Image (spheres, rainbow, N blue to C red):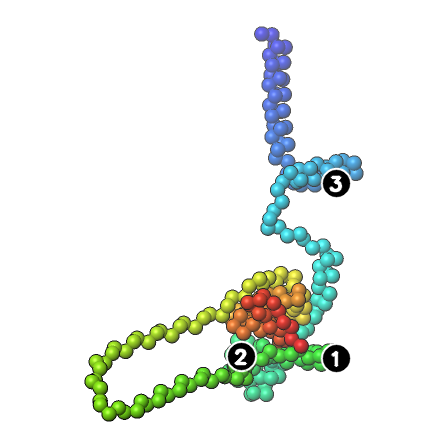
Amino acid sequence: MSSIEMRLAALEAQVVELKTENELLKMLTPLEAITEGLKAATPAEVEGWMAACEAVTGKMPASKTSKPKLTKEEKEKKNTNPTGPAEFNAFIQAIWHEMAAVEGVVGEHDDAFKKASKEVGVTFQKARAEASRRKAEMEGKPAPVPKAPKAAAAAAAPKVAAPKAAAPKAAAPKAAAPKAAAPKAAAPKAEPAAPKAAAAPAALTAPTDEQIVEATADYDDAMRSKMKAECEGYGWQACVFEEKACWLDPSTGDVFSYDSIATLGVYDAESGEFCASE
């Protein structure tokens, strides 16, 4: 083989190797290179690249768990009063300390203060209810209707006395005393029926995050977490009443606002219907 043929063979081998490396580089193109390429591309090239991206993503199955992201304008529209929750939370805290001071409890807003104020009957829920009442009074709105305590509601319900069985009349004595009959074994008393558990409410819809935020526009996420823990501790169930997030007490059927301050109505588990408070 001549030297020219050897050089041609070597050049062909180099060309094949370079093509292979080029294909590998195309598959390993970094994102920074694509970004820089888009910056230097013409509007027509960018439009073609976008069309190719849409064609590829259109073939991919949509994610079931992904939620559409809100734009900046939608977020601002959703939270029309961004400083409101922080201001109202500070107002609740001030009322809390004011009510506790009346009972002789003062100090920093820490766990020790919360424990001491709870011992004298001043809780976060009571402070929140009083703050909501004062806020409505300052804004010229009707004060929210506080929910009735369970103990008071139970005491107000009249108890129906069970009818007493009439005492059997004594039989008149006969002239000849009959033979004494053998005593019959007493029939075992039936075991009292176990109390029925409160019927689980049917056909109820759990509120969405948007409905909860709308129902608690004056609170922040930390306050909403406290409300949820507090109401679930009562055994209440979160539901939707007249397209608003609220709480249902399955044991009584009472429906309360999501901040548990106002009574909205009563739910009938058997018929699946709400009856709004007048």
First in sequence: mark 3 or mark 1?
A: 3
Q: Position of residue 78 (x, y in %)?
A: 71, 62
Label 3 is placed on what type of residue? Lys
First in sequence: mark 3 or mark 2?
A: 3
Residue holding disc 3: 39
Q: Residues within 10 Å of mark 2 (few under 14, many from 20)?
A: few
* Residue 144 left/right relative to 251: right
First in sequence: mark 2 or mark 1?
A: 1
Residue holding disc 1: 140
Q: Position of residue 155 (x, y in %)?
A: 52, 84
| Residue at the farthest front position | 175
Dot in front, 3 or 1: 1
Q: Residues within 10 Å of mark 3 (few under 14, many from 20)?
A: few
| Quadrant for the C terminus in the image | bottom right
- Whole-number angstrom distance, CA of label 3 to CA of label 1: 57 Å
Can you tell which quarter of the image residue 95 is in?
Answer: bottom right
Image vertical order of residue 46 relative to residue 121, above or below:
above
Residue holding disc 2: 150
Image vertical order of residue 113 relative to residue 236, above or below:
below
Q: Position of residue 233 (x, y in %)?
A: 51, 71
Number of labels in the image equals 3
SS at mark 2?
helix
| Quadrant for the N terminus in the image | top right
Q: Position of residue 273 (x, y in %)?
A: 61, 67
State the residue at coordinates (72%, 39%).
Answer: 50
Label 2 is placed on what type of residue? Lys
SS at mark 3?
helix
